[in-house]
Amino acid sequence: MLFQDFNPPIPGPVTAKEKRRIKFHLDLQDNIQNGWMSKAIEQLRAKNVERTGFPMGYNPFEDVPQYGKTNRATEKVPKFSEFPFGMRSR
């Protein structure tokens, strides 16, 4: 025989306490998706969007302008020989 016989334990019937917990969980999920909780969550999200100023469909990975295209340096970088600590003749 390659493997030992494995007989997993069969759970007993669902107790009244477990039924109450399952019902509570299902009611909570229903409230979150369709009830007053969903409206409260939407209002909180709208407040956060107003605070940040980003629209709901904002994608932080693709909608951000690239640094090099927006913040180009306007001043010209001086040459090394123009610096006061450049090479001097003795």
Image: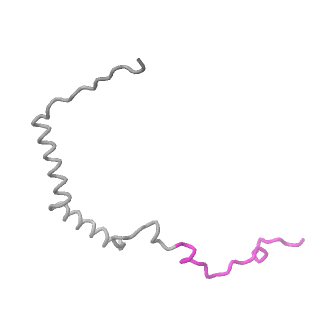
Colour scheme: one colour
Instruction: Decide which of 56, 34 is in the foreground and name it.
Output: 34
Location of residue 89 by image quarter: bottom right
Left or right placement of residue 13 versus residue 88 in this view: left
Left or right placement of residue 49 versus residue 30 in this view: right
85 lies above or below 17: below
Q: Farthest residue to the top: give it.
A: 1
Q: Farthest residue to the front: give it.
A: 1
Tally of numbered tags: 0
Q: Residue at x 17, y 47 (%)?
A: 25
Q: Residue at x 32, y 71 (%)?
A: 51
Which region is colored magenta?
66-90
Location of residue 35 by image quarter: bottom left
Instruction: Decide which of 16, 69 is in the foreground and name it.
Output: 16
How would you classify the magenta stretch by its main secondary structure?
A: loop
Q: Farthest residue to the left: give it.
A: 16
User: In which quadrant will I find the N terminus?
Assistant: top left
Left or right placement of residue 88 versus residue 77 in this view: right
Residue 42 spot, x, y in % from top left = 23, 66
User: In which quadrant will I find the C terminus?
Assistant: bottom right
Q: Does the magenta stretch include residue 13?
A: no
Residue 66 spot, x, y in % from top left = 53, 72
Q: Is residue 69 magenta?
A: yes
Location of residue 76 by image quarter: bottom right
12 lies above or below 4: below
Residue 30 spot, x, y in % from top left = 17, 55
